[in-house]
Amino acid sequence: MQFVSMALSPADKTVPLPLFEGVPAPKSPAQEAKLPSYLRDHRKRLRSRFLDGGAAAMPDYELLELVLFRAIPRQDVKPVARRLMESFGSFNAVLSAPSARLKDVKGVGDAIVCELKIVEASAHRLAKTRVMRRPILSSWDALLEYLATAMAHREIEQFRVLYLDTKNTLIADEEQAKGTVNHVPVYPREVVKKALELNASALILVHNHPSGDPTPSQADINITEQIRQACSVFSISLHDHIIVGQERHVSFRSEGLL
């Protein structure tokens, strides 16, 4: 096997390489310095406020501006940030929006979508690391935060199963199915089959209601009972079924439905 060394000229070394095809590379401080002074000052103020006070010191649209600075290095990002907020309503909803819908907003292209999806993926991964391989009962608030981050603003229903071992430690988070805005197909046999493959002793069902209202439907109640019965045949416990809405969640266990 032969390796070829390619030396870069000094000129080559100053050219930023794109991270993805069609997505521009981040701009250097020198390039951002070409901004009009009022835009440079605005960006500096937002960054300083974020560093001093964190996200709590900023409204959603300004936090969104910070994310867009890298995607739109030499323009005012405020109009795009405001259009995104008007279209989707909140910072979380913008991050969770499908790429195709984001591109329907004037001024949004591949670079912006890429930045938003990087932030979304980072938030999901961080929230997930706080609950995986940890006892659920002692990490319940972190679990609810993770589920809200991952599912609260989805535009279609998603059904997932959290599989637990004998110590109630979360060993797997499996997406079982995606559906429409108000329906997702769920098969009890597949849920139990995966539990047996993982040697899980208990599970928690989770799905979202894109309408925002997590009140269980009769169909939700029926499928929960079907899965509970299927699990009982193999001595697998069904601890709970959590429905995630935009602002709150419902626990079947807490509501006496399980």
Image (tube, rainbow, N blue to C red):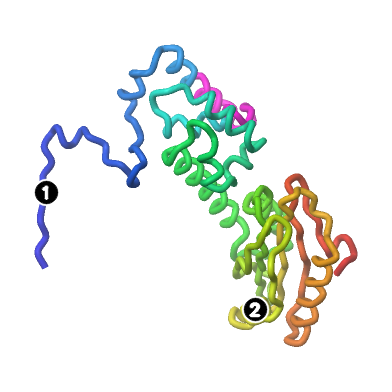
Task: Specify start and end residues of the magenta stretch as a single range.
Answer: 45-62
- Would you say residue 172 sits in the magenta stretch? no
Whether residue 192 appears in this view of the structure is yes
- Would you say residue 60 sits in the magenta stretch? yes
Residue at 45 percent of width and 38 percent of height: 109
On the image, numbered disc 1 is attached to which residue?
6
Q: Residue 118: x and y, percent?
A: 48, 46
Residue at 59 percent of width and 62 percent of height: 132
179 relative to 6, above or below: below
Residue at 39 percent of width and 28 percent of height: 73
Q: Residue 28: x and y, percent?
A: 32, 29
On the image, numbered disc 2 is attached to which residue?
190
Q: Nearer the viewer, residue 232 or 93?
A: 93
Task: Kindly identify the amino acid type of the residue bearing the numbered disc 2.
Answer: Glu
Task: Kindly identify the amino acid type of the residue bearing the numbered disc 1.
Answer: Met
Q: CA distance from mark 1 to mark 2?
A: 52 Å
Secondary structure beneath dot 1 equals: loop
Quarter that holds the C terminus:
bottom right
Q: Residue 42: x and y, percent?
A: 49, 18
96 relative to 250, above or below: above
Q: Is residue 204 left or right of residue 124?
A: right
Q: Residues within 10 Å of mark 2 (few under 14, many from 20)?
A: few
Q: Is residue 83 left or right of residue 15?
A: right
Characterize the magenta stretch by its predominant secondary structure. helix
Taking the view exactly as shown, the residue that stands out farthest to the top is: 37
First along the sequence among labels 1 and 2 = 1
